[in-house]
Amino acid sequence: MTDDIITRPRTRAKPKVERPKLYKVILLNDDYTPREFVVRVLKAEFRVSEDQAHRIMITAHRRGVCVVAVFTRDVAETKATRATDAGKAAGYPLTFTTEPEE
Ligand code: TYC
């Protein structure tokens, strides 16, 4: 009876799951947007704490740019656009860009 055991050939393909490429959202410094406004936009769009938003804002202010967070491409682009539009709607040149991670 043991001779009748049929074993399935192990031919199942190894599932190939690609890790999606991640994109950085980058905050650019400018001379006009008030600091508190930058902090407010960071909190609203990126759901960071007051403390974290302040750190990100100050880093961009001092160094010219700061990486806010990384997301999949669609999410990064949507958030960067929404955050930039929030500044534009208030009359500020606040700018967020995206860039693929190395
Ligand atoms: N530099 C601006 C000011 O002095 C504040 C600011 C910080 C603006 C960071 C943009 O990404 C920015 N009012």
Image (tube, rainbow, N blue to C red):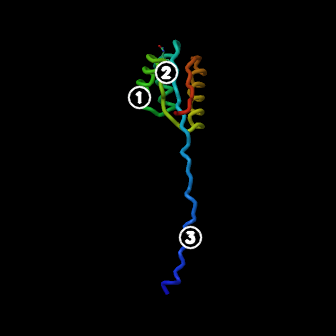
Taking the spot 60% from the left edge, 37% from the top edge, the residue there is 74
**Distance Cα–Cα, label 3 vs label 1:** 54 Å
Residue closest to the far left: 51
Label 2 crowding class (10 Å Cα cut-off): few <14, some 14-19, many 20+?
some
Label ID, residue 9:
3
Task: Give the SS element for disc 2.
Answer: strand
- Mark 2 close to ligand 1, CB under 8 Å: yes
Residue 61 drawn at (x, y percent): 46, 17
Residue hosting label 1: 52
Taking the spot 51% from the left edge, 84% from the top edge, the residue there is 3
- Three-letter amino acid code of the residue under disc 2: Val
- Mark 1 close to ligand 1, CB under 8 Å: no
Q: Which one is earlier in the sequence, the residue at label 2 or at label 3?
A: 3
Q: Nearer the viewer, mark 1 or mark 2?
A: 2
- In terms of depth relative to the viewer, which is nearer, 51 or 56? 56
Residue 37 drawn at (x, y percent): 49, 21
Quadrant of the image occupied by residue 100: top right
Residue 46 drawn at (x, y percent): 49, 32
Whether the residues at callouts 1 and 2 have beta carbons within 8 Å, the answer is no
State whether residue 60 is above or below residue 75. Answer: above
Residue closest to the far top: 31
Q: Nearer the viewer, mark 2 or mark 3?
A: 3
**Distance Cα–Cα, label 2 vs label 3:** 56 Å
Residue 22 drawn at (x, y percent): 54, 37
Whether the residues at callouts 2 and 3 have beta carbons within 8 Å, the answer is no
Residue hosting label 2: 65
Label ID, residue 63:
none
